Image (cartoon, rainbow, N blue to C red):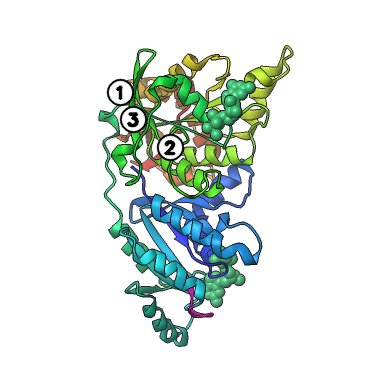
Amino acid sequence: MGNIVAIVGRPNVGKSTFFNRLIQRREAIVDAVSGVTRDRHYGKSDWNGKSFSLIDTGGYVKGSDDIFEEEIDKQVELAIEEADAIIFMVDVETGITGMDEDVANLLRKVEKPVFLAVNKVDNSKRLENAVEFYSLGLGDYFPIASTNGSGTGELLDAIIEALPEQEDDEETELPRFAVVGRPNAGKSSFINALIGEDRYIVTDIAGTTRDSIDTKYNRFGFEFNLVDTAGIRRKSKVKEDLEFYSVMRSVRAIENCDVCLIVLDATRGFDGQVQNIFWLAQRNRKGIVILVNKWDLLEKETNTMKDYEQNIRKEIEPFTDVPIVFISVLEKQRIYKAIETAVEVYNNRSKKIKTSELNDRMLPIIEHYPPPAWKGKYVKIKYCMQLPTPQPQFAFFCNLPQYVREPYKRYLENKLREEFDFTGVPISVYFRKK
Ligand code: GDP
Ligand code: GDP
């Protein structure tokens, strides 16, 4: 089960600088591969082996200066409801402002862990000045400087300490499917079609406890849990179509599932937001099925489906081994196929390949095309095994792991996919010294 940490605070205190610092390194790698750079406000971070999703709520504040305040209050309320822990960031340079006090008032009543981060503490004078933030009534604060990272380690230590333990019981449970996508893609319609109107679920999500998120279904001969997203309506004053809210929900759902059913509206295509969701699911190593909904609305010619599919595959490179199912919830077309595919992906993700079989199949392939020499060094791969992790990870043992280059790693990943069928599942390949 994943944890969500939200950063709140007024504009310009340094939230996005801090956010980028925490997720930068790994995002940069992903981006280099896909060639995409985008402004992202949520990402995955880890510290001392514990990972969490980080959301910069400031990225979702819209509007001009004068409506900021109301917007920020909304973000904070949502963060309070949805996140597991909250970082409240303030700025030592400006000192306490009225807006800071408002936010502090909201946060003082919260039972979740709240961390007061006093940012821009770049020198000892500012360290002294930071004391004034005690008056916010939130207890101890963390003096940090997001630009150079000072103090962030202590803050992260404290956050990790406060987050609930992550359970690793994925294998013993039913498949958990999350239906995610942009507003209006047809997620609720899809869920309703699945479970039947009469069995519309109402779950009390006030506590957002883990247990209330999953709801169990038995349909088409499969038993699975649906992880809460759009289907469950909240009874809060905050508008549902707030982008931040839907993002928060998606992140939570993705964190808590085994397989993401990413629903998109065929008339809108695979746009940036869908790509973000895809990327997040992939980074979280979840199974993925893409459902192109509202297929009934498209004028179709001979190659429409094939072309559409190819375009999506281009968008999701290099992880293209993902099932794409064209559905129409309205006409109840291929709804069963969608669930069947999700079950297949779930099974692929929990697949365990015996070491003997793995070596029997992979070693001849490696022998036929060994890692090319690099800087005059020859890498000899001796054997491989699947690691006992909930999602597929493979270790290849060799003499000089540091000399194996990215293309060869991808080559092995592709061969593993060809030999064993990991459709819809991100897999990891590691090289270890032996
Ligand atoms: P946000 O609106 O809260 O996301 O704030 P930004 O991250 O965009 O930062 C606002 C400004 O504060 C930028 O000019 C940053 O370079 C600056 N800033 C952020 N962190 C620090 C810091 O630790 N020290 C100093 N001196 N400036 C910082
Ligand atoms: P959500 O916001 O993703 O939960 O989307 P909804 O399920 O509320 O659907 C948004 C709109 O799309 C509604 O008006 C639905 O009736 C419509 N819709 C959903 N699925 C289909 C479909 O397969 N075909 C067509 N034509 N409309 C659909």
Q: Quadrant of ligand 2?
A: top right
Nearer to us: label 2 or label 3: 3
Q: Main secondary structure of the magenta part?
A: loop
**Residue 369 in view of the camera:** no
The one of 427 and 246 positioned closer to us in this rendering: 246
Would you say residue 95 sits in the magenta stretch?
A: yes
User: Label 2 is placed on what type of residue?
Assistant: Arg
Cα distance in 3D space between marks 2 and 3: 22 Å
> Where is mark 1, residue-wise?
354
Secondary structure beneath label 3: strand
User: Label 3 is placed on what type of residue?
Assistant: Thr
- Which region of the structure is painted magenta? 90-96
> Where is mark 2, residue-wise?
285
**Residue 268 in view of the camera:** yes
Q: Residue at x 64, y 66 (%)?
A: 65
Residue 69 in the image: state x and y as whole percent. Answer: 55, 65
State which quadrant residue 359 falls in.
top left
Residue 8 in the image: state x and y as whole percent. Answer: 47, 62
> Where is mark 3, residue-wise?
215
Q: Residue at x 45, y 26 (%)?
A: 416
State which quadrant residue 59 falls in.
bottom right
